[in-house]
Image: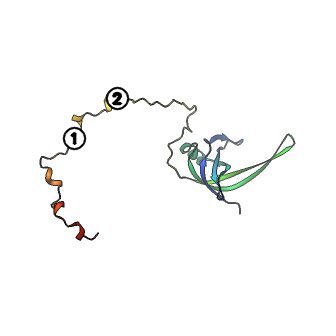
Amino acid sequence: MNHIYLTGNLTRDVVKMTSKKGTIYIRGNIAVRKNYGEGANFIDFKIFGNGALTFGKYTKKGSKVAINGEMEIRKVNTNGEWKVYADVMVRDFEFLGTKPKSDFDKQEKEWEPPTDEYVRPPESIRATASDIETNETEDETDWVSETDDENVDWESIEF
């Protein structure tokens, strides 16, 4: 039986790819903490079809995810040297964190440097004190308890 279940964080943004047959898939890498000490294992994975698009759309580097699938081992001969690659072919996945939506669908990612300056909101969405309704009543005693705290014997009360 070839079944693997991993929970960890993405080490980078996933990469959208197309197979020779035209199938859309993504490649990614997940860091899984070791059970027996410090460190992590870094495991490559692939997701095919519509699941790949969903996964890519809602994850980015650092996203915590759980993946479920099977291990695939490939041997590749390049220039007379054999290399072995292991990938998890993901069947199911689950988002475990609350990271914001990624830029997966954008062709070019636009980056703006962070600013420490306060940006005043536009006039059209700013509220003034006269815009805010108050529920003040003239008789402010309606919130006062009928029991006077000074006359209560707190030691005789069982909590």
The spot of residue 153 in percent (x, y) is 20, 67
Q: Nearer the viewer, residue 87 or 158?
A: 158
Residue type, label 1: Glu
Q: Quadrant of residue 60?
A: top right
| Element type where label 1 sits in the image | loop
Mark 2 nearby-residue class (10 Å; few <14, some 14–19, many ≥20): few
Q: Position of residue 93 (x, y in %)?
A: 58, 53
Q: How is the image coloured?
A: rainbow
128 left or right of 105? left
> How far, Cα to Cα, is label 1 from label 2?
21 Å
Disc 2: which residue? 122
| 41 over 114 or under it: above or below | below
Q: Residue furthest left?
A: 139
Side of 154 where 45 appears, left or right? right
Q: Which residue is mark 1?
A: 133
Q: Which quarter of the rendering shows the N terminus?
A: bottom right
Position of the C terminus, as image quadrant, is bottom left
Residue at 23 percent across and 66 percent down: it is 154
Query: Which amino acid lies under the numbered mark 2 shown in the image of this protein?
Result: Pro
For the point 54% across and 30% down, the residue is: 111
Marking on residue 153 = none
Front position in the image: 50 or 71: 71
Q: Position of residue 156 (x, y in %)?
A: 23, 71
Residue 57 as seen in the image, left or right of residue 147: right
Where disc 2 sits, the SS reads loop
Q: Residues within 10 Å of mark 1 (few under 14, many from 20)?
A: few
Q: Answer with mark 1 or mark 2, whichever residue precedes in sequence.
A: 2
Q: Is residue 88 left or right of residue 139?
A: right
Where residue 75 appears, as percent x and y from the top left, is: 80, 49
Number of marks in the image? 2
